[in-house]
Image (spheres, grey):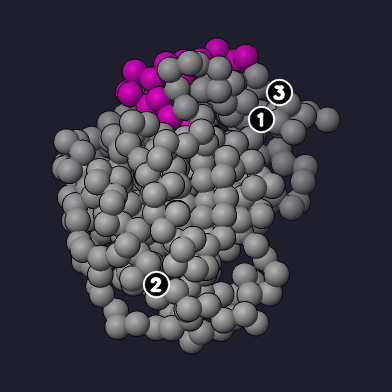
Amino acid sequence: MTSYTLDRRETINTLLAERKDTLVVTGLGSPTYDVHAAGDRDDNYYLWGAMGGAALTGLGLAQAQPDKHVLVITGDGEMLMAYGAMATIAVAAPSNLDIVVLDNQHYGETGMQPSHTGQGIDFAKVAAASGFSETATVSSNDDLQVLNKNIYQKASGPRLFVIKVKAENLPRSLPPRDATFIKNRFRRHLGLEVC
Amino acid sequence: MANAEHNNSGQPWQQALYKILRDAGVDHACYVPDAGHSELINLYENDSTTTANVLTTEEEGIAIATGAWLGGRRSVLLMQSSGVGNCINMLSLPVLSQTPLLMLVTMRGEWGEFNPWQVPMGKATQPALEAIGLTVLRADDTDSLLATVSQATLMTYSANQQIAVLMGQRLLGEKKW
């Protein structure tokens, strides 16, 4: 198996540095910790469960906020549980939704068991075949610099980017687990009523 | 496909149901095709002021509806009872975050059912939904359905509840072959 060297925390720090008013949804496990480590914000929506729900929560949000850029940051294991979501998102075809899969080819949260992505399953190809407007797999710093610019440019349809990162469990950076608080904070940020 | 089942398309109660939902501000829908919902699906798909998502599996709609509410839109999720079992863990999301969720579930396996494969999930539908924390309401005739959905929209979107309305197979009629 190829081993990758990109550090997931540095990768997300760099990726989110230019986000401006991009709305971010995170998939459970390490991606949630990585995004929190880059700085807690009202416009982050963290998932701590509901595995397979990150990309689709992003779809609903993108359809409700068509003038805002929505960025889903999740892992390979979480996205594998949302395989069908690539079909649903491709058919829905929002042009303001991007999915970043932080792919360490393992289930880091449960003991680093190998996932499908180290064994031939290629999300970028699956998304491209499904009809995403742009897909890429990034594994070097140079490619990451290109992606960091590209991801905040206007797209013609949904995009999916795989970032191959080093398989390691970093110290956890824990956002609030209070799902109602996170929801209300996020909606208040958008100027929406909170119950 | 949908039209092979039930034969409900064009029934006036589905148009009345659509009006109730639209009057309640529900301009977003997700569905796995079902004959009992076929007219409602057509209405959501063919209205330029609505968004409709066809799903590959029912739990996708739970996450989409949650995201839609996060961004300020009201969504309804349409499925058959066989799809409820697919939804259970994903329902943690709206239940825990107190995000409004309205599911309209057409029942199979309970009244005039010819297909035994529909029966186990038909029996499990209400207890499974209640076990994960949803409020389950039920209608077995069209007047009751319209009244139930009308008040459920208020409870869902104003009181932040997660509600499944079960549409009885008696209301929908037996499947025609």
Name the spot of residue A142 as percent of width and height, x first: 46, 63
> In the image, is residue B14 part of the stretch drawn in magenta?
yes
Distance (Cα) linking label 1 and label 2: 46 Å
- Residues tagged by mark 3 and mark 1 found on one chain of the structure: yes
Q: Say what secondary structure mark 2 lies in.
A: helix
The reply to whether residue B166 is in sight is no
Q: Amino acid at mark 3?
A: Asn
Identify which residue is drawn at 19% across, 52% down.
Answer: A42
Disc 3 designates what residue?
A: B7
Mark 1 packing: few (<14 Cα in 10 Å), some, or many (20+)?
A: many
Residue receiving disc 1:
B35
Q: Are marks 2 and 3 in contact (CB under 8 Å)?
A: no
The chain containing the residue under callout 1 comes to B
Residue, disc 2: A8
- Residue, far right: B177
Image label count: 3
A175 or A127: nearer the viewer:
A127
Q: Residue at x 32, y 52 (%)?
A: A24
- Amino acid under label 2? Arg
A168 to the left or right of B24: right
Q: Position of residue B88 (x, y in %)?
A: 48, 58
The answer to whether A155 is drawn above or below residue A137 in the figure is above
Residues tagged 3 and 1 counted as in contact (Cβ below 8 A): yes
Quadrant of the frame with the C terminus of chain B: top right
Chain of the residue under the numbered disc 3 shown in the image = B
Q: Which residues are magenta?
A: B10-30
Q: Residues within 10 Å of mark 2 (few under 14, many from 20)?
A: many
Q: Residue at x 57, y 40 (%)?
A: A133
Badge 1 amino acid: Ala
Precedes in sequence: disc 3 or disc 1:
3
Q: Position of residue B38 (x, y in %)?
A: 62, 26
